[in-house]
Image: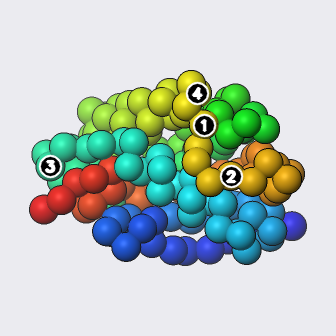
Amino acid sequence: MSVHARISLLPFLAGLLLLTASPRAAEVGYPTLIAGQLATAMDLSREEGKALEGVTVKVELDLEPGGKVRDAVIVAVEKARSEEDRRSASAALGHALDHFRSTPFKGLDSDDYATWGHMRLTFQLGLHVGGYQP
């Protein structure tokens, strides 16, 4: 069974995040924890944030028990105004994912690995996502 929830990434991030994870993962907040760290690692400039406003990126994550990214597949980039915006959105998330291939996500309880080891996250990029501040 999957849980779908619509939440804010972090108080200072205005992007919407749709989650598909186990009910336990959503209950504990692991998708939000992971998404917040990914959004911060995206580090979009002001111009990039404006250009990517409203672009949606879906990613499937497989994590190692230690919290590093084992595999990540960007499964869709939607609502991009141009092919350049589509590539920029994929690249921004790709760079953030690469960071977590060598550095584990923080705050993950190894006893709950079955709940956060695999999930699908959907980001709506733009205002405030990745540290963009107007």
Q: CA distance from mark 2 to mark 1?
A: 9 Å
Describe residue 94's horizontal placement relative to residue 28 as left or right.
left
Q: Earlier in the sequence, mark 2 or mark 3?
A: 3
Residue 76: x %, y % from top left: 53, 43
Q: Can residue 94 be seen in this snapshot?
A: no
Q: Which residue is mark 1?
A: 104
Q: Which mark is residue 108?
A: 2
Q: CA distance from mark 2 to mark 4?
A: 15 Å
Write the residue at 57% across / 63% down.
32
Crowding near the residue tagged with mark 3, few <14, some 14–19, many ≥20 C-alpha atoms within 10 Å: some
Which one is in front in this view, the residue at disc 2 or the one at disc 4?
2
Write the residue at 41% across / 51% down.
39
Describe residue 134's horizontal placement relative to residue 98 as left or right.
left
Three-letter amino acid code at disc 3?
A: Arg
Q: For the C terminus, which image quadrant?
A: bottom left
Which image quadrant for residue 124?
bottom left
Q: CA distance from mark 3 to mark 1?
A: 27 Å
Three-letter amino acid code at disc 2?
A: Leu
Element type at mark 4? helix
Which one is in front in this view, the residue at disc 3 or the one at disc 4?
4
Q: Which residue is mark 4?
A: 101
Residue 3: x %, y % from top left: 74, 70
Q: Which mark is residue 46?
A: 3
Three-letter amino acid code at disc 1?
A: Pro
